[in-house]
Every structure is written in structure tokens, then in C-alpha cells.
Image (spheres, rainbow, N blue to C red):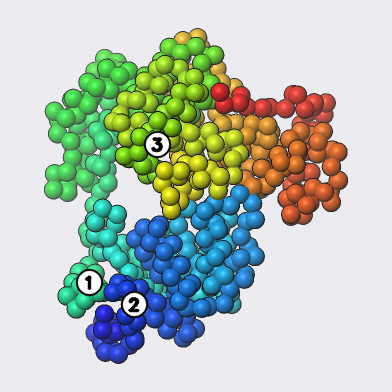
């Protein structure tokens, strides 16, 4: 907090500047350094990334930088932002951009992130400051002149690894972008500065560690058997499995692997769940097991889905039943979703909303097969999916989902839940076909559900989305519905000038007209009632 800057140059020499910065003593926190530091760097003509630990801190940092630095509006970025289907984060991003500051986190949609990334990369744009979580450091092409890192702890107080720090610092300076870069670690005291210097600046990245043994045993064995199946091997014996696992790179790193007894136990569990079968002395995947081995879904998730859908007639395999079943999986349970853990109203509201969907009893039982908070969270995720598919605007969705959690954002979790459900829905459908009571056949159900989950649109506009997909945004599809444009006949009746007013893009107008002509060419006598339409969620 004394304004000094200690650093290492490219040749490895250490240096220190005692009065690099005039600290502004305001809050007794990192912002006393971050505000004047960012102001100084931008004043020197640099583009700056400020890394913070969590989404709320990222947005709060962008707000106080906007309030205190008085930069001009980032008009190029503002001009590129989507106009439709805004979230709470969308409105905050616009406010920050009016003050020349952008933020980047999971609450922004794809169009918003692209607008921020592309203009920040442009040396001629007026956007010079980007506040972000570590996602920007993980593969997003956003180099900067300088990087400011304020905070090196993950949520839950787990410290960042040295490799993570080096990755963030590596955003400073990029060949062809700027000849050199600077990375600043913000320290609140001399003791903290010394710790950060020795641990991170002088530290060496951690040794490469195999993630092979991170997989839980059941999924690990399924993946090995899937590999054997792909190579036309007729299964593996138990000794083959044991030898394979124990001879991997993971097995050579401090003995990190499965013991023979653990493998025997896992094989028994997989056999009991009808995931693998034994033919003579060799094990191979069943049709159910192939889903785990080929698609990467965890075995425990397959067991849960199978329990939820087992024996159901085709009439009960509704979109709602499939979507709710997806929420019971490990993959969806791992998504952090905003829930007020002590609110009785929160619990009652979302459980009641789920009960009103009249789901099959076995699906309801599986939704409950967790602790009380987990049950409420699953019901709330399911409700968010239904709102998403009904085409409810994001800001209205957030207002509904955050009724008991004011001053929070939900756009990121909503999209994450929809995307992960989309990833899993084909597996849910395949399992449903295997365990149904009467030869459940879905036709195009999975494709249509995946399309609707990707875009967040109702069934009546899905026929157009199946042709155009991401060439239109969610807001475009919802605007078309609002204008009553949900059939080919309705598009035939509207003039281009009026349609252009709905989608605000000549490119999108041309894409819509072209898609409709392609549909006609595919089926010349097509009638609106013959268009492929998903079964509405019930």
C-alpha cells in the first residue's frame, strides 16, 4: 500500500521503483491501489485487464472504476451490443461502458462477450479497460499492455495455483500486439507483498499431473471399455483392466491409481446396474453402458436417469419429464445455481411449481433423492428451463428467480443450466428408449429440444430455428413471435420493410427469407400444419 513497484525484467534482473504510484486512501482496500493504477496506465496509452476472483467482485470493480476515473464512453462497444433480450448484467454493462469500462463474466451472453472482446482487441477503439474473471485468461484472445491482478483466491478461499497466476500474467504483452507487457500484483501490506513475490512471481508452475485418476472408478472403467470397443476388441478381462489402469501415467505418479480390490468392487456395481456384462471371462459395455463410455456422461447419472424413466409408457415421456430427469444428474448438480438456502418461501415456491407440471411419480422421486437444499435447487433449475423454453425475457426471468435473492444476477446460471441440459438431453432420450415400457420412440424430439434449449425459444418458432440456428439471436426469435410471425403464411403476408423493423438487420432479413424458400424447396406443398413442431412442455 506504499505505491512501490517491484518487478523482474525479461533478462531476469530484479528492480524496484519506490514511488511508482500515488495511493488514494479511500476504503482501506485494493481499490485504493487499483483506481489510481488503472488511471495511470490508461493515461500512458495502455489497454488494461483487471483480474478479480468472482462475478460480483468483477462487476463491483467495473462500477467503481467507472465512477472514479471519468473515461469517455466506449461507443464502439456500445454500438455492437445486442438490443434484445437483456439481462440484469446487460444493463450494468451498458452503464459501465458509458464510463469507458467493460467487464467480462458468465452473466453476459455470447453477443455481449464478443462485442467486448473484439473492441478491446482493437488498438483504435476507445475501450481500454476490461475487468474480468479468469475465464478471459483461459483461452479467450484478449491480450493487453498491462494486467492488474487483485486477489488470488478462488471462492472458498482456495489459493490460485502458480500456473493460474502465470496464465493471467501472460495476457500482458503479445507478439504483434504490443512489444512488451507489465503484470501488477496488488498487495495490501509489506508482508503480503513479500508473500506474493516469493510464491507467485518467483515461483515455478506446478508439475504436470495426470487427470486420468480424477475420474470416479465407474466412469473410468466405462471409458476404458468404450475405447476397447472402438478398437474392435471383444471386451477386457478383469486382469486386463487392472493392468491397463495401473500402467498409466497416473499410476506412475506417487501410486495414484485404483487398487485391484477397488476395480473388482467397481465391476460388481457396474454389472448390477446393467452397465457392463460378462461374456465368458471378458467384460464389455451393454447398450446402456455405451452411453457412459461413448458420450462421457457419468455412470451415476445414467443410473439416476434409468431409475427415473424405467418402465414409463411413451405417453409419459414428455418434454417436461425428460427435462426434469436431466436435472437429477451429477452434471447438472455441479452447476452453481442461486438458491436462498434458508428461505421457506423459496423452497415452497419451486417445489410447488414442479408439482404443478404433473411429472411421472418416478421422476418426482428422483428429483427428491438428495438433501433438502439439493431438492429445492433441482426444482428451481427445472423451473428456469421451463421459463427459458417459454421465451420469457431474461430480465423477467431473473426477477422471478431472484425474488428471494435481491441484488444478485442469474443470467449466467440460467444459460449454464440450459447449455448443460442441452448437452445431456440426447443421452436422456437414449436411456429413455432403452428403459421405457413400450418401445418409446422419439423421432426428432431430441433435435428439437436441443435447438430450443440452445436458443431459449418456444415450440411454435422452432421450425425456423432448426434451419437458422444461431444466425438469429434469442431476442430475434422472441421479437418475431411478438410480431405474430410463427408460420410461413405469416411471413408471406409481411413486407420486407416491416420485417426489417422487427429484426433490425438486412443480413438477418435475407437469412429468414432464404430459410423459408429452402423449406418450400424441400417440401413444395408444405402447409403450416405440416411443419415439424416439438411437443409443448407439459
Q: Give residue 198's position: percent from left, percent from top.
A: 18, 73
Rendered view: 211 above or below 307:
below
The reply to whether callout 1 and callout 2 are in contact (CB within 8 Å) is no
**Residue at the spot 34% in from the left edge and 86% down from the top edge:** 21
The reply to whether callout 2 and callout 3 are in contact (CB within 8 Å) is no
Residue 107 appears left or right of 299:
right
Instruction: Identify residue for label 2.
Output: 26
Closer to viewer: mark 1 or mark 3 = 3
Residue 498 appears left or right of 54:
right
Instruction: Identify residue for label 1.
Output: 196
List the single residue furthest toward the top: 438
Q: Give residue 246's position: percent from left, percent from top.
A: 18, 38
Q: Give residue 41's position: percent from left, percent from top.
A: 43, 82
**Residue at the spot 40% in from the left edge and 70% down from the top edge:** 50
The answer to whether residue 519 is visible is no
The span from disc 1 to disc 2 (Cα, nearest Å) is 23 Å
The picture quadrant where one finds residue 460 is top right
Q: Secondary structure at mark 1?
A: helix
Instruction: Identify residue for label 3.
Output: 346
Rendered view: 62 above or below 339:
below
**In which quadrant will I find the C terminus?**
top right
Which numbered disc, 1 or 3, marks the residue that appears first in the sequence?
1
**Residue at the spot 49% in from the left edge and 48% down from the top edge:** 411
Amino acid at each position: 500500500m506504499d505505491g512501490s513497484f517491484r518487478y523482474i525484467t525479461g533478462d531476469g534482473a530484479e528492480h524496484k521503483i519506490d514511488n511508482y504510484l500515488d495511493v488514494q486512501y479511500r476504503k482501506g482496500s485494493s481499490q485504493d491501489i487499483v483506481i489510481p493504477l488503472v488511471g495511470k496506465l490508461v493515461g500512458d496509452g495502455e489497454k488494461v485487464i483487471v483480474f478479480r476472483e468472482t462475478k460480483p467482485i468483477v462487476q463491483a470493480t467495473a462500477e467503481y472504476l467507472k465512477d472514479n476515473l471519468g473515461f469517455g464512453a466506449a461507443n464502439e462497444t456500445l454500438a455492437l451490443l445486442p438490443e434484445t433480450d437483456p439481462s440484469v448484467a446487460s444493463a450494468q454493462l451498458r452503464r459501465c461502458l458509458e464510463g469507458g469500462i467493460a467487464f467480462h463474466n458468465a452473466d453476459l451472453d455470447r453477443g455481449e462477450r464478443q462485442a467486448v472482446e473484439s473492441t478491446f482487441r482493437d488498438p483504435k477503439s476507445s475501450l481500454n479497460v476490461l475487468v474480468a474473471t479468469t475465464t478471459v485468461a483461459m483461452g479467450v484472445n484478449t491480450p493487453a499492455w498491462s494486467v492488474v491482478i487483485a486477489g488470488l483466491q478462488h471462492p472458498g478461499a482456495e489459493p490460485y495455483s502458480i500456473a493460474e497466476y502465470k496464465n493471467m500474467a501472460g495476457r500482458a504483452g503479445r507478439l504483434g500486439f504490443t512489444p512488451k507487457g507489465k503484470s501488477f500484483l496488488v498487495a495490501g501490506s509489506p508482508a503480503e507483498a513479500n508473500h506474493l513475490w516469493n510464491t507467485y512471481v518467483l515461483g515455478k508452475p506446478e508439475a504436470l499431473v495426470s487427470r486420468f485418476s480424477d475420474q470416479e472408478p465407474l466412469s473410468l472403467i466405462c471409458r476404458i471399455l468404450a475405447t476397447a470397443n472402438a478398437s474392435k476388441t471383444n471386451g477386457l478381462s478383469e486382469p486386463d483392466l487392472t493392468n491397463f489402469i495401473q500402467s498409466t501415467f497416473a499410476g506412475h505418479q506417487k501410486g495414484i491409481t485404483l487398487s485391484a480390490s477397488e476395480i473388482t468392487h467397481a465391476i460388481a456395481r457396474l454389472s448390477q446396474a446393467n452397465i457392463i456384462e460378462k461374456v465368458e471371462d471378458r467384460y464389455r459395455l451393454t447398450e446402456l453402458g455405451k452411453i457412459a463410455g461413448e458420450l462421457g456422461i457419468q455412470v451415476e447419472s445414467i443410473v439416476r436417469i434409468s431409475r427415473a424413466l424405467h418402465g414409463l409408457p411413451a405417453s409419459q415421456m414428455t418434454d417436461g419429464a425428460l427435462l426434469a430427469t436431466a436435472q437429477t444428474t451429477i452434471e447438472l448438480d455441479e452447476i452453481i445455481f442461486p438458491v436462498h438456502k434458508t428461505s421457506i418461501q423459496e423452497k415452497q415456491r419451486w417445489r410447488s411449481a414442479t408439482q404443478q407440471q404433473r411429472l411421472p411419480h418416478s421422476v418426482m422421486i428422483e428429483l427428491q433423492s438428495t438433501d433438502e437444499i439439493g431438492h429445492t435447487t433441482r426444482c428451481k433449475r427445472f423451473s428456469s428451463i421451463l421459463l427459458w423454453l417459454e421465451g420469457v425475457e431474461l430480465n423477467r426471468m431473473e426477477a422471478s428467480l431472484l425474488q428471494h435473492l435481491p441484488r444478485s444476477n442469474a443470467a449466467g446460471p440460467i444459460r449454464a443450466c440450459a447449455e448443460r441440459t442441452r448437452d445431456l438431453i440426447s443421452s436422456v432420450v437414449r436411456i429413455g428408449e432403452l428403459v421405457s415400457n413400450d418401445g418409446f420412440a422419439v423421432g426428432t424430439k431430441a433435435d428439437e429440444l436441443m435447438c430450443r434449449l440452445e436458443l431459449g425459444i418456444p415450440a411454435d418458432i422452432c421450425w425456423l430455428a432448426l434451419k437458422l440456428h444461431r444466425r438469429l439471436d434469442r431476442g430475434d426469435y422472441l421479437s418475431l413471435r411478438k410480431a405474430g410471425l410463427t408460420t410461413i403464411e405469416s411471413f408471406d403476408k409481411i413486407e420486407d420493410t416491416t420485417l426489417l423493423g422487427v429484426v433490425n438487420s438486412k443480413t438477418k432479413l435475407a437469412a429468414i427469407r432464404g430459410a423459408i424458400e429452402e423449406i418450400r424447396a424441400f417440401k413444395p406443398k408444405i402447409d403450416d400444419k405440416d411443419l415439424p413442431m416439438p411437443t409443448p412442455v407439459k
